[in-house]
Image: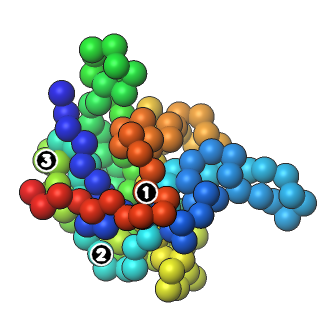
Amino acid sequence: MNRIGWPLASNRIRRGALNHTFGMVRRNADGSRRAHQGWDFEAPAGHRCYAIADGTIAKVRNVGSYGQQVILRFTHDFDDDGEPDTLYAAYCHLSRIDVTEGQMVTRGQQLGLTGNTGNASSMRGPDQHLHFEIRTVPLPGRGLAGRFSPMVVFGRCPLNEPIRKAVS
């Protein structure tokens, strides 16, 4: 079974705030809830990001609010039924991409560098981040459909204390 690693050398949710995690955790101006599709990991521009699992690069894009992005196809038995499930890890707002579509990668391999592209282009200091998603399809569209909380692969959320990537 495919082992799971972490996408950064140091992994902590941006500002240690729940609204940078997965689900209906954001608020509109009128106070109503809205979705956030993944986790925002604290990451100043230029930090290396890594493949969380062995897999294949499904997409390399520079589109809309996600900016430069890499989408990794991998397998993981997230529902513990003994069968590997195909999932996709999306790495967004990158400043540099070091892989190409169709390329096979190994867990821990550098995919690119964090950045401020897409809707993160004006973010500075502690708001700079890697937006990271776990998906069931490569390009799911808006909302939470086609996505899972990254908890399904990591098993824990680095909300207050960073989780450091083991040196491979």
Residue drawn at the location 59% of the way across and 34% of the way down: 145
Residue type for callout 2: His
Q: Which label's residue is closer to the chain start, 2 or 1?
A: 2
Residue 94 visible somewhere in the drawing: yes
Residue 158: image tag = 1
Which of the two residues, 158 or 43, is positioned nearer the viewer here? 158
Q: Which label's residue is closer to the chain start, 3 or 2?
A: 2
Up/down of 1 relative to 125, above or below: above
- State which mark lies toward you, 1 or 3: 1
Q: Quadrant of residue 44?
A: bottom left
Q: How many marks?
A: 3
Other residues around mark 3 within 10 Å, as few (<14) / some (14–19) / many (≥20): few
Q: Position of residue 82 (x, y in %)?
A: 27, 14
Model colouring: rainbow
Kindly report the distance in space between the C-alpha atoms of the residues bearing marks 1 and 3: 23 Å
Residue underneath mark 2: 47
